Amino acid sequence: MSGLKRLIPILDRVLVQKTAAPTATAGGVLLPESAVQKINSATVIAVGPGRRSSTGELIPMSVKEGDKVLLPDYGGTTVKLQDNEYHIYRDDELLGVLTE
C-alpha cells in the first residue's frame, strides 16, 4: 500500500491549494513578511460530486480540477496532508473562476 493519500471531498465541497505569495519583486528585491499581501486565489485540486436539490436532482459543481478560483477573505477549513496545506470550501463560497 502506498503512503500517498488523496482526499476526495464529499457533496458540494472543493479542495484547493492557495497560490504562494511572491517573496521578491520583479527586480529581485526580497520583500519582508509584513509587506507580502494575503493571496486569495487558489488552484482546485479536487471537487465533490455536487449536492442534491430538494427534489433529489444532482446540482453539478461550478468548478473542475485545475481551475484557478478567487477565495473569500474568511472561511474554509484548513487541512494538512503530507506536509502540504490545503483548504476546503463549499462550492457556493467561491467568489469566481479566474481565466487568462
Image: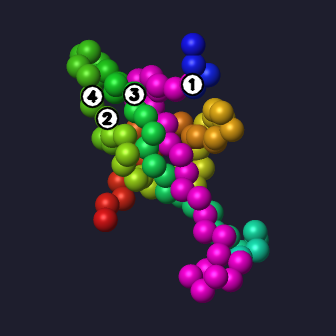
Residue tagged by mark 4?
Answer: 59
Quadrant of the image for the N terminus? top right
Residue at (76% x, 74% y) in the render: 32
**Which residue carries the number 2 mark?**
61
Residue bearing mark 1: 5
Which of pointers 4 and 3 lies earlier in the amino acid sequence?
3
Q: Position of residue 69 (x, y in %)?
A: 42, 52
Residue 50: in magenta span: no
The answer to whether the residues at label 2 and label 3 have Cβ atoms under 8 Å apart is yes
Would you place residue 87 above or below residue 4 in this image?
below
Q: Which residue is mark 3?
A: 48
Q: Residues within 10 Å of mark 4 (few under 14, many from 20)?
A: few
Q: Quadrant of the C terminus?
A: bottom left
The kind of secondary structure element at disc 3 is loop
Q: Which three-letter amino acid code belongs to the residue tagged 4? A: Ile
Q: Nearer the viewer, mark 1 or mark 2?
A: 1
Quarter holding residue 80: top right
Q: Which mark is residue 55?
A: none
